[in-house]
Image (cartoon, grey):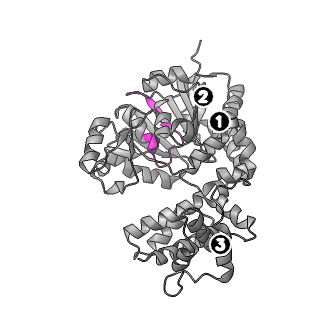
Protein backbone atom coordinates (compact mmCIF):
# COMPACT_ATOMS: atom_id res chain seq x y z
CA UNK A 1 0.00 0.00 0.00
CA UNK A 2 1.30 3.46 -0.88
CA UNK A 3 1.85 6.19 1.74
CA UNK A 4 -0.86 8.18 -0.04
CA UNK A 5 -3.40 5.36 0.38
CA UNK A 6 -2.51 4.97 4.07
CA UNK A 7 -3.05 8.68 4.61
CA UNK A 8 -6.46 8.53 2.96
CA UNK A 9 -7.43 5.66 5.26
CA UNK A 10 -6.37 7.63 8.34
CA UNK A 11 -8.60 10.52 7.28
CA UNK A 12 -11.49 8.13 6.63
CA UNK A 13 -11.01 6.41 9.99
CA UNK A 14 -10.86 9.72 11.86
CA UNK A 15 -14.15 10.65 10.17
CA UNK A 16 -15.73 7.44 11.46
CA UNK A 17 -14.38 7.98 14.98
CA UNK A 18 -15.75 11.54 15.04
CA UNK A 19 -19.19 10.29 13.99
CA UNK A 20 -19.30 7.27 16.31
CA UNK A 21 -20.42 7.10 19.91
CA UNK A 22 -17.98 4.29 20.67
CA UNK A 23 -14.34 4.21 21.84
CA UNK A 24 -11.77 4.80 19.12
CA UNK A 25 -10.14 1.39 19.53
CA UNK A 26 -13.45 -0.38 18.86
CA UNK A 27 -14.12 1.77 15.80
CA UNK A 28 -10.59 1.18 14.51
CA UNK A 29 -10.83 -2.59 15.02
CA UNK A 30 -14.09 -2.78 13.07
CA UNK A 31 -12.66 -0.51 10.37
CA UNK A 32 -9.62 -2.75 9.87
CA UNK A 33 -11.62 -5.99 9.99
CA UNK A 34 -13.77 -4.69 7.15
CA UNK A 35 -10.64 -4.05 5.04
CA UNK A 36 -8.80 -7.34 4.89
CA UNK A 37 -6.59 -6.01 2.10
CA UNK A 38 -4.61 -3.94 4.60
CA UNK A 39 -1.42 -5.83 5.49
CA UNK A 40 0.29 -5.98 8.87
CA UNK A 41 2.93 -3.35 8.01
CA UNK A 42 0.30 -0.94 6.69
CA UNK A 43 -1.90 -1.52 9.76
CA UNK A 44 1.01 -0.58 12.00
CA UNK A 45 1.73 2.60 10.01
CA UNK A 46 -1.96 3.52 9.97
CA UNK A 47 -2.30 2.90 13.71
CA UNK A 48 0.82 4.90 14.55
CA UNK A 49 -0.52 7.91 12.66
CA UNK A 50 -4.05 7.57 14.05
CA UNK A 51 -3.06 7.25 17.73
CA UNK A 52 -0.41 9.93 17.33
CA UNK A 53 -3.07 12.36 16.12
CA UNK A 54 -5.40 11.40 18.97
CA UNK A 55 -2.56 12.06 21.44
CA UNK A 56 -1.95 15.47 19.83
CA UNK A 57 -5.61 16.31 19.29
CA UNK A 58 -5.89 19.37 21.54
CA UNK A 59 -2.69 20.98 20.26
CA UNK A 60 -3.54 20.36 16.61
CA UNK A 61 -7.09 21.69 17.03
CA UNK A 62 -5.90 24.74 18.98
CA UNK A 63 -3.36 25.59 16.27
CA UNK A 64 -5.95 25.32 13.52
CA UNK A 65 -8.45 27.48 15.40
CA UNK A 66 -5.76 30.04 16.26
CA UNK A 67 -5.27 30.43 12.51
CA UNK A 68 -8.97 30.75 11.80
CA UNK A 69 -9.64 27.21 10.57
CA UNK A 70 -12.20 24.79 12.01
CA UNK A 71 -10.57 21.40 12.70
CA UNK A 72 -11.69 18.54 10.49
CA UNK A 73 -10.19 15.04 10.15
CA UNK A 74 -8.46 16.06 6.91
CA UNK A 75 -7.02 19.30 8.33
CA UNK A 76 -5.94 17.52 11.52
CA UNK A 77 -3.98 14.98 9.46
CA UNK A 78 -2.41 17.63 7.24
CA UNK A 79 -1.46 19.77 10.23
CA UNK A 80 0.03 16.73 11.97
CA UNK A 81 2.30 16.04 9.01
CA UNK A 82 3.66 19.58 9.26
CA UNK A 83 3.85 19.95 13.05
CA UNK A 84 4.72 16.41 14.19
CA UNK A 85 6.71 15.21 11.16
CA UNK A 86 8.14 18.60 10.09
CA UNK A 87 7.15 17.90 6.47
CA UNK A 88 7.47 20.62 3.87
CA UNK A 89 4.32 21.80 2.13
CA UNK A 90 5.51 20.27 -1.13
CA UNK A 91 6.00 16.92 0.61
CA UNK A 92 2.48 17.08 2.04
CA UNK A 93 1.11 18.00 -1.39
CA UNK A 94 2.88 14.98 -2.89
CA UNK A 95 0.90 12.76 -0.50
CA UNK A 96 -2.35 14.27 -1.80
CA UNK A 97 -2.33 13.68 -5.58
CA UNK A 98 -6.02 12.74 -5.77
CA UNK A 99 -7.51 9.86 -7.71
CA UNK A 100 -7.75 6.24 -6.69
CA UNK A 101 -7.17 5.74 -2.97
CA UNK A 102 -5.17 8.93 -2.39
CA UNK A 103 -6.36 12.09 -0.61
CA UNK A 104 -7.71 14.87 -2.79
CA UNK A 105 -5.17 17.50 -3.94
CA UNK A 106 -4.51 20.46 -1.65
CA UNK A 107 -6.80 23.40 -2.26
CA UNK A 108 -5.28 26.87 -2.42
CA UNK A 109 -6.72 27.72 1.01
CA UNK A 110 -5.28 24.53 2.53
CA UNK A 111 -1.83 25.24 1.14
CA UNK A 112 -1.94 28.78 2.53
CA UNK A 113 -3.03 27.45 5.92
CA UNK A 114 -0.21 24.90 5.97
CA UNK A 115 2.30 27.60 5.11
CA UNK A 116 1.22 29.49 8.22
CA UNK A 117 1.26 26.31 10.33
CA UNK A 118 4.81 25.58 9.19
CA UNK A 119 6.03 28.69 11.05
CA UNK A 120 4.76 27.25 14.34
CA UNK A 121 5.67 24.40 16.69
CA UNK A 122 3.56 21.65 18.22
CA UNK A 123 3.87 23.46 21.56
CA UNK A 124 3.08 27.19 21.39
CA UNK A 125 3.69 29.65 24.23
CA UNK A 126 0.11 30.93 24.03
CA UNK A 127 -1.45 27.50 24.56
CA UNK A 128 -3.42 27.10 27.81
CA UNK A 129 -2.15 24.45 30.20
CA UNK A 130 -5.03 22.09 29.35
CA UNK A 131 -4.15 22.23 25.65
CA UNK A 132 -0.45 21.59 26.28
CA UNK A 133 -1.34 18.76 28.64
CA UNK A 134 -3.99 17.29 26.31
CA UNK A 135 -6.88 17.06 28.77
CA UNK A 136 -10.37 18.64 28.97
CA UNK A 137 -10.41 22.16 30.40
CA UNK A 138 -13.24 21.36 32.84
CA UNK A 139 -11.20 18.70 34.65
CA UNK A 140 -8.15 20.88 35.36
CA UNK A 141 -9.21 21.98 38.90
CA UNK A 142 -9.82 18.37 39.90
CA UNK A 143 -6.42 17.25 38.64
CA UNK A 144 -4.71 20.25 40.23
CA UNK A 145 -6.21 19.29 43.58
CA UNK A 146 -4.32 15.99 43.39
CA UNK A 147 -1.04 16.98 41.70
CA UNK A 148 -0.59 20.68 42.53
CA UNK A 149 2.50 22.14 40.88
CA UNK A 150 3.34 18.71 39.39
CA UNK A 151 0.31 18.81 37.13
CA UNK A 152 2.22 19.70 33.95
CA UNK A 153 4.74 16.90 34.54
CA UNK A 154 2.04 14.34 35.29
CA UNK A 155 -0.06 15.28 32.26
CA UNK A 156 3.05 15.27 30.07
CA UNK A 157 3.73 11.66 31.04
CA UNK A 158 0.07 10.82 30.43
CA UNK A 159 0.40 12.10 26.85
CA UNK A 160 3.04 9.52 26.00
CA UNK A 161 2.41 6.03 24.69
CA UNK A 162 2.25 3.41 27.45
CA UNK A 163 4.75 0.53 27.59
CA UNK A 164 3.65 -3.10 27.27
CA UNK A 165 3.81 -4.82 30.65
CA UNK A 166 3.42 -8.53 31.26
CA UNK A 167 2.58 -10.40 34.44
CA UNK A 168 4.38 -13.70 34.88
CA UNK A 169 1.94 -16.51 35.66
CA UNK A 170 3.36 -18.14 38.78
CA UNK A 171 1.13 -21.16 38.21
CA UNK A 172 3.27 -21.98 35.16
CA UNK A 173 6.73 -20.51 35.74
CA UNK A 174 8.74 -17.80 37.52
CA UNK A 175 10.04 -14.49 36.21
CA UNK A 176 13.41 -15.87 35.10
CA UNK A 177 11.69 -18.73 33.30
CA UNK A 178 9.31 -16.38 31.51
CA UNK A 179 12.16 -14.08 30.48
CA UNK A 180 14.09 -17.00 29.06
CA UNK A 181 11.05 -18.24 27.13
CA UNK A 182 10.48 -14.79 25.65
CA UNK A 183 14.16 -14.40 24.82
CA UNK A 184 14.04 -17.68 22.91
CA UNK A 185 11.49 -16.01 20.65
CA UNK A 186 13.62 -12.92 20.22
CA UNK A 187 11.91 -10.75 22.84
CA UNK A 188 14.21 -9.22 25.47
CA UNK A 189 11.92 -8.29 28.36
CA UNK A 190 13.14 -6.41 31.43
CA UNK A 191 11.93 -6.85 35.04
CA UNK A 192 9.58 -4.14 36.23
CA UNK A 193 10.75 -1.89 39.06
CA UNK A 194 7.86 -2.36 41.51
CA UNK A 195 6.08 -5.62 40.77
CA UNK A 196 8.09 -8.82 41.37
CA UNK A 197 5.81 -10.50 38.82
CA UNK A 198 6.27 -7.96 36.04
CA UNK A 199 8.17 -7.80 32.77
CA UNK A 200 8.30 -4.81 30.44
CA UNK A 201 8.70 -5.20 26.70
CA UNK A 202 10.96 -2.84 24.72
CA UNK A 203 8.26 -2.24 22.09
CA UNK A 204 4.83 -3.40 20.98
CA UNK A 205 4.83 -6.90 19.59
CA UNK A 206 2.37 -9.47 18.23
CA UNK A 207 2.29 -11.18 21.61
CA UNK A 208 -0.57 -13.58 20.86
CA UNK A 209 1.62 -15.22 18.24
CA UNK A 210 4.34 -15.91 20.82
CA UNK A 211 4.58 -19.34 22.43
CA UNK A 212 5.04 -18.07 26.03
CA UNK A 213 1.71 -16.24 25.74
CA UNK A 214 -0.12 -19.17 24.11
CA UNK A 215 1.23 -21.48 26.82
CA UNK A 216 -0.03 -19.22 29.59
CA UNK A 217 3.37 -18.21 30.94
CA UNK A 218 2.56 -14.50 30.72
CA UNK A 219 -0.47 -12.21 30.56
CA UNK A 220 -0.64 -8.59 29.45
CA UNK A 221 -1.21 -6.49 32.58
CA UNK A 222 0.06 -3.06 33.58
CA UNK A 223 2.53 -3.14 36.46
CA UNK A 224 0.25 -0.98 38.58
CA UNK A 225 -2.66 -3.34 38.10
CA UNK A 226 -0.47 -6.21 39.30
CA UNK A 227 0.24 -4.33 42.54
CA UNK A 228 -3.48 -3.94 43.26
CA UNK A 229 -3.95 -7.71 43.35
CA UNK A 230 -0.91 -8.14 45.60
CA UNK A 231 -2.33 -5.75 48.20
CA UNK A 232 -5.15 -8.18 48.94
CA UNK A 233 -2.60 -10.49 50.59
CA UNK A 234 -4.56 -13.48 49.18
CA UNK A 235 -3.13 -16.81 50.35
CA UNK A 236 -3.60 -20.48 49.43
CA UNK A 237 -6.67 -21.98 51.07
CA UNK A 238 -8.46 -18.67 51.63
CA UNK A 239 -11.83 -17.51 50.32
CA UNK A 240 -11.33 -14.50 48.01
CA UNK A 241 -13.65 -12.53 45.75
CA UNK A 242 -12.84 -10.26 42.80
CA UNK A 243 -16.08 -8.27 42.90
CA UNK A 244 -15.70 -6.34 39.62
CA UNK A 245 -13.72 -8.96 37.75
CA UNK A 246 -14.35 -7.84 34.17
CA UNK A 247 -12.27 -9.97 31.79
CA UNK A 248 -10.35 -11.48 34.69
CA UNK A 249 -6.90 -9.89 34.70
CA UNK A 250 -6.72 -9.48 38.47
CA UNK A 251 -8.60 -12.74 39.00
CA UNK A 252 -5.73 -14.53 37.27
CA UNK A 253 -3.23 -12.79 39.53
CA UNK A 254 -5.22 -13.78 42.61
CA UNK A 255 -5.40 -17.40 41.46
CA UNK A 256 -1.60 -17.45 41.19
CA UNK A 257 -1.24 -15.93 44.67
CA UNK A 258 -3.50 -18.67 46.02
CA UNK A 259 -1.58 -21.40 44.13
CA UNK A 260 -4.93 -22.74 42.88
CA UNK A 261 -5.90 -23.60 46.47
CA UNK A 262 -8.97 -22.20 48.13
CA UNK A 263 -12.11 -20.52 46.86
CA UNK A 264 -11.86 -17.67 44.36
CA UNK A 265 -15.02 -15.98 43.05
CA UNK A 266 -14.96 -13.76 39.95
CA UNK A 267 -18.07 -11.57 39.91
CA UNK A 268 -19.33 -9.00 37.42
CA UNK A 269 -22.60 -7.62 36.15
CA UNK A 270 -21.52 -8.22 32.53
CA UNK A 271 -21.83 -11.85 31.48
CA UNK A 272 -19.90 -11.17 28.26
CA UNK A 273 -16.84 -10.03 30.20
CA UNK A 274 -16.83 -13.10 32.41
CA UNK A 275 -17.15 -15.32 29.34
CA UNK A 276 -14.00 -13.69 27.94
CA UNK A 277 -12.27 -14.51 31.22
CA UNK A 278 -12.99 -18.23 30.76
CA UNK A 279 -10.42 -18.67 27.98
CA UNK A 280 -7.79 -16.71 29.93
CA UNK A 281 -8.37 -18.84 33.02
CA UNK A 282 -8.01 -22.04 30.98
CA UNK A 283 -4.79 -20.86 29.34
CA UNK A 284 -3.33 -19.83 32.69
CA UNK A 285 -4.23 -23.11 34.38
CA UNK A 286 -6.34 -21.38 37.05
CA UNK A 287 -8.64 -24.09 38.47
CA UNK A 288 -9.97 -22.62 41.70
CA UNK A 289 -12.11 -19.87 40.10
CA UNK A 290 -15.91 -19.78 40.00
CA UNK A 291 -17.48 -17.14 37.78
CA UNK A 292 -20.71 -15.52 38.97
CA UNK A 293 -22.85 -12.98 37.11
CA UNK A 294 -24.42 -10.36 39.38
CA UNK A 295 -27.76 -8.74 38.58
CA UNK A 296 -26.47 -5.55 40.23
CA UNK A 297 -24.10 -4.49 42.98
CA UNK A 298 -26.91 -5.35 45.43
CA UNK A 299 -27.45 -8.87 44.10
CA UNK A 300 -29.06 -11.26 46.64
CA UNK A 301 -25.94 -13.43 46.35
CA UNK A 302 -24.07 -10.77 48.34
CA UNK A 303 -26.47 -11.07 51.26
CA UNK A 304 -26.20 -14.87 51.25
CA UNK A 305 -22.37 -14.72 51.18
CA UNK A 306 -22.00 -11.92 53.72
CA UNK A 307 -18.99 -12.20 56.01
CA UNK A 308 -17.55 -15.28 54.29
CA UNK A 309 -14.46 -13.97 52.45
CA UNK A 310 -10.95 -13.42 53.75
CA UNK A 311 -10.16 -10.88 51.04
CA UNK A 312 -12.40 -8.77 48.80
CA UNK A 313 -11.05 -6.83 45.83
CA UNK A 314 -13.21 -4.04 44.44
CA UNK A 315 -11.72 -2.63 41.24
CA UNK A 316 -14.63 -0.27 40.73
CA UNK A 317 -15.88 1.22 37.44
CA UNK A 318 -14.37 4.69 37.16
CA UNK A 319 -13.48 7.61 34.90
CA UNK A 320 -10.40 5.81 33.58
CA UNK A 321 -8.33 9.00 33.84
CA UNK A 322 -5.32 6.91 34.86
CA UNK A 323 -5.40 5.05 31.53
CA UNK A 324 -5.47 8.05 29.18
CA UNK A 325 -2.09 7.18 27.70
CA UNK A 326 -3.64 3.90 26.49
CA UNK A 327 -7.00 5.43 25.54
CA UNK A 328 -6.28 9.01 24.43
CA UNK A 329 -9.74 9.50 22.96
CA UNK A 330 -11.50 8.58 26.22
CA UNK A 331 -10.63 11.88 27.89
CA UNK A 332 -12.64 13.83 25.33
CA UNK A 333 -15.75 11.66 25.83
CA UNK A 334 -15.72 12.04 29.63
CA UNK A 335 -18.09 14.61 31.17
CA UNK A 336 -18.60 15.99 34.69
CA UNK A 337 -21.95 14.22 34.72
CA UNK A 338 -20.20 10.91 33.98
CA UNK A 339 -17.90 11.41 36.96
CA UNK A 340 -20.81 12.22 39.28
CA UNK A 341 -22.68 9.07 38.20
CA UNK A 342 -19.56 6.94 38.63
CA UNK A 343 -18.85 8.29 42.11
CA UNK A 344 -22.39 7.40 43.20
CA UNK A 345 -22.04 3.92 41.67
CA UNK A 346 -18.67 3.41 43.38
CA UNK A 347 -20.26 4.20 46.71
CA UNK A 348 -22.99 1.61 46.20
CA UNK A 349 -20.56 -1.04 44.97
CA UNK A 350 -18.13 -0.53 47.84
CA UNK A 351 -20.89 -0.61 50.46
CA UNK A 352 -22.30 -3.83 49.03
CA UNK A 353 -18.97 -5.61 48.51
CA UNK A 354 -17.84 -4.68 52.02
CA UNK A 355 -20.56 -6.96 53.41
CA UNK A 356 -18.67 -9.94 51.97
CA UNK A 357 -15.63 -9.28 54.16
CA UNK A 358 -15.34 -11.49 57.20
CA UNK A 359 -14.30 -9.97 60.56
CA UNK A 360 -10.53 -9.65 60.45
CA UNK A 361 -10.62 -9.85 56.65
CA UNK A 362 -9.23 -7.39 54.11
CA UNK A 363 -11.12 -5.13 51.69
CA UNK A 364 -9.15 -3.49 48.87
CA UNK A 365 -10.85 -0.67 46.96
CA UNK A 366 -9.19 0.45 43.72
CA UNK A 367 -9.80 2.60 40.66
CA UNK A 368 -7.76 3.47 37.59
CA UNK A 369 -8.55 7.13 38.29
CA UNK A 370 -6.48 10.19 39.11
CA UNK A 371 -9.38 12.04 40.74
CA UNK A 372 -9.66 12.40 44.53
CA UNK A 373 -13.44 12.08 44.44
CA UNK A 374 -13.01 8.53 43.10
CA UNK A 375 -10.23 7.75 45.56
CA UNK A 376 -9.43 9.47 48.84
CA UNK A 377 -12.82 11.18 49.12
CA UNK A 378 -14.69 7.94 48.43
CA UNK A 379 -12.79 6.09 51.19
CA UNK A 380 -13.28 8.92 53.68
CA UNK A 381 -17.03 8.76 53.08
CA UNK A 382 -17.06 4.98 53.41
CA UNK A 383 -15.12 4.95 56.68
CA UNK A 384 -17.42 7.59 58.14
CA UNK A 385 -20.42 5.33 57.48
CA UNK A 386 -18.72 2.00 58.28
CA UNK A 387 -17.00 2.26 61.64
CA UNK A 388 -16.23 -1.46 61.74
CA UNK A 389 -13.58 -0.91 59.03
CA UNK A 390 -10.20 0.74 59.49
CA UNK A 391 -7.60 1.94 57.01
CA UNK A 392 -4.35 -0.04 56.94
CA UNK A 393 -1.37 2.23 56.13
CA UNK A 394 0.30 1.40 52.84
CA UNK A 395 3.96 0.96 53.95
CA UNK A 396 3.23 -2.00 56.23
CA UNK A 397 0.89 -3.68 53.76
CA UNK A 398 3.41 -3.18 50.94
CA UNK A 399 6.23 -4.80 52.91
CA UNK A 400 3.99 -7.71 53.91
CA UNK A 401 2.38 -8.32 50.50
CA UNK A 402 5.12 -7.34 48.04
CA UNK A 403 8.19 -8.05 50.15
CA UNK A 404 10.13 -4.82 49.54
CA UNK A 405 10.37 -1.44 51.21
CA UNK A 406 7.45 0.75 50.19
CA UNK A 407 8.59 3.49 47.77
CA UNK A 408 5.44 5.58 48.39
CA UNK A 409 4.42 7.53 51.50
CA UNK A 410 0.82 6.34 51.81
CA UNK A 411 -1.52 5.95 53.58
CA UNK A 412 -3.10 5.19 50.20
CA UNK A 413 -1.57 3.78 47.04
CA UNK A 414 -1.42 6.52 44.40
CA UNK A 415 0.34 5.57 41.14
CA UNK A 416 0.88 7.61 37.98
CA UNK A 417 2.99 7.48 34.81
CA UNK A 418 5.27 10.31 35.95
CA UNK A 419 5.84 9.12 39.52
CA UNK A 420 5.93 5.34 39.13
CA UNK A 421 6.03 4.61 35.40
CA UNK A 422 2.68 2.78 35.61
CA UNK A 423 -0.86 3.67 34.65
CA UNK A 424 -2.64 5.91 37.14
CA UNK A 425 -4.22 4.01 40.02
CA UNK A 426 -5.65 4.61 43.47
CA UNK A 427 -6.03 1.91 46.10
CA UNK A 428 -6.95 1.77 49.78
CA UNK A 429 -6.51 -1.31 51.96
CA UNK A 430 -9.13 -1.68 54.69
CA UNK A 431 -9.62 -4.25 57.45
CA UNK A 432 -12.85 -5.25 59.08
CA UNK A 433 -12.71 -5.29 62.85
CA UNK A 434 -12.72 -8.71 64.49
CA UNK A 435 -15.33 -9.30 67.20
CA UNK A 436 -14.13 -8.18 70.61
Q: CA distance from mark 2 to mark 1?
A: 9 Å
Farthest-out residue, top: 436
152 with respect to 12 (left or right): right
Q: Residues within 10 Å of mark 2 (few under 14, many from 20)?
A: some
Q: Earlier in the sequence, mark 2 or mark 3?
A: 3
Query: Where, by quadrant of the figure, is residue 71 drawn?
Result: bottom right
Residue bearing mark 2: 412
Q: Earlier in the sequence, mark 1 or mark 3?
A: 3
Image disc number at residue 89: none
Position of the N terminus by quadrant: bottom left
Residue bearing mark 3: 115
Position of the C terminus by quadrant: top right
Badge 2 vs badge 1, beta-carbon distance below 8 Å: yes
Q: Please give the range of residues in magenta.
A: 234-251
Q: CA distance from mark 1 to mark 3?
A: 47 Å
Residue bearing mark 1: 375
Amino acid sequence: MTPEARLALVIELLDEIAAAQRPADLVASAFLRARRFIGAKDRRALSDRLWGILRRRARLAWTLRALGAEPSPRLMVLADLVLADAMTIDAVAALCPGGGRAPAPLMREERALLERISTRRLFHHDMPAWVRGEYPEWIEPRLSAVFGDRLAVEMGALRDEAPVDLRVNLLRTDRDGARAALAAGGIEAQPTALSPWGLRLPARTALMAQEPFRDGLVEVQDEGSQLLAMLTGAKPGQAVVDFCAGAGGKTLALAAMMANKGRLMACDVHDSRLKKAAERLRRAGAHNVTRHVLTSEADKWVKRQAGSFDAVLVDAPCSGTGTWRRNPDAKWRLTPEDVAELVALQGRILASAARLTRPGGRLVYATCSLLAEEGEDRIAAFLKENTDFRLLPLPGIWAESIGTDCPLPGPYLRLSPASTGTDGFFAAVLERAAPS
